[in-house]
């Protein structure tokens, strides 16, 4: 039996629906609202088909507008999707990386985030500080809205991730020389 970690799937993949039946804890990938209402309705219908095929939970693509995520959840619930929906949050590590990923994923970014990042885009340390502030604020807003879990896209970079976790009171230091056991 394969691990659920290998099952996140992109919209449009028929394989994702058929594979949900064979997995212990399948997860499916969802996109936030698109500019076209027809595309969005189709995405919700396709997501419902994946859930009906056996997905246990959903992780969204990255987003930067908390209200977009909350509306997406309301729309999923209205469509009969009852599994947990976990928000996917890309933490801002660098300005070029942020621009590249938001353009690639066609993510909506609120003006206040763009303005904050534009003001510090040439100072990597200031961009990371802004990334911590923005990421922590989004996490706090989501948790205040009742979201029970967060999926952080860290891109294998720990500085901003640890900063956000510290801001949320979720970071714990381990004594020097100790290691977490992996099973």
Image (cartoon, rainbow, N blue to C red):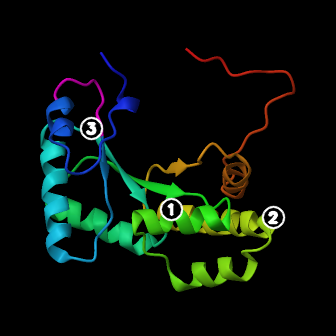
Does 160 appear above or below 141?
A: above
Q: Residue at x 79, y 37 (%)?
A: 173
Does 5 appear above or below 98?
A: above
Q: Residues within 10 Å of mark 2 (few under 14, many from 20)?
A: few
In the displayed structure image, the side of residue 56 where residue 112 appears, left or right: right
Q: Which residues are magenta?
A: 21-27
In the displayed structure image, the side of residue 141 where residue 158 appears, left or right: right
Q: Are marks 1 and 2 in contact (CB under 8 Å)?
A: no
Q: Residue at x 65, y 17 (%)?
A: 181
Quarter of image, res 96: bottom right
- Disc 2 versus disc 3: nearer the observer: 2
- Disc 1 versus disc 2: nearer the observer: 1
In the displayed structure image, the side of residue 20 where residue 129 appears, left or right: right
Residue 80 visible, this orientation: no
Give the quarter of the figure containing the N terminus. Answer: top left
**In what element is the residue under mark 1?**
helix
Quarter of image, res 54: top left
Q: Which residue is mark 1?
A: 101
**In what element is the residue under mark 3?**
loop
Residue 120 visible, this orientation: yes
Q: CA distance from mark 1 to mark 2?
A: 19 Å
Q: Residue at x 28, y 24 (%)?
A: 24
Q: Main secondary structure of the magenta part?
A: loop
Quarter of image, res 22: top left
Q: Residue at x 37, y 66 (%)?
A: 69
Q: Which residue is mark 2?
A: 125
Q: Which residue is mark 3?
A: 56
Give the quarter of the figure containing the C terminus. Answer: top right
Q: Are marks 2 and 3 in contact (CB under 8 Å)?
A: no
Q: Earlier in the sequence, mark 2 or mark 3?
A: 3
């Amino acid at each position: 039996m394969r691990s659920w970690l290998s099952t996140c799937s992109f919209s449009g993949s028929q394989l994702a629906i058929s594979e949900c039946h064979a997995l212990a804890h399948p997860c499916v990938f969802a996109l936030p609202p698109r500019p076209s209402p027809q595309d969005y309705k189709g995405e919700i219908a396709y997501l419902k088909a994946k859930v009906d095929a056996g997905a246990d939970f959903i992780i969204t693509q990255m987003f930067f507008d908390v209200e977009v995520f909350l509306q997406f959840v309301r729309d999923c619930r209205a469509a009969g999707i009852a599994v947990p929906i976990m928000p996917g949050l890309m933490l801002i590590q660098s300005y070029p990386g942020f621009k590249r990923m938001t353009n690639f994923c066609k993510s909506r970014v609120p003006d206040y985030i763009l303005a904050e990042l534009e003001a510090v885009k040439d100072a990597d340390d200031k961009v990371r500080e802004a990334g911590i502030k923005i990421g922590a604020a989004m996490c706090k807003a989501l948790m205040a809205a009742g979201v029970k879990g967060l999926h952080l896209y860290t891109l294998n970079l720990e500085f901003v991730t640890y900063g956000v976790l510290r801001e949320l009171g979720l970071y714990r230091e381990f004594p020097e020389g100790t290691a977490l056991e992996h099973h």
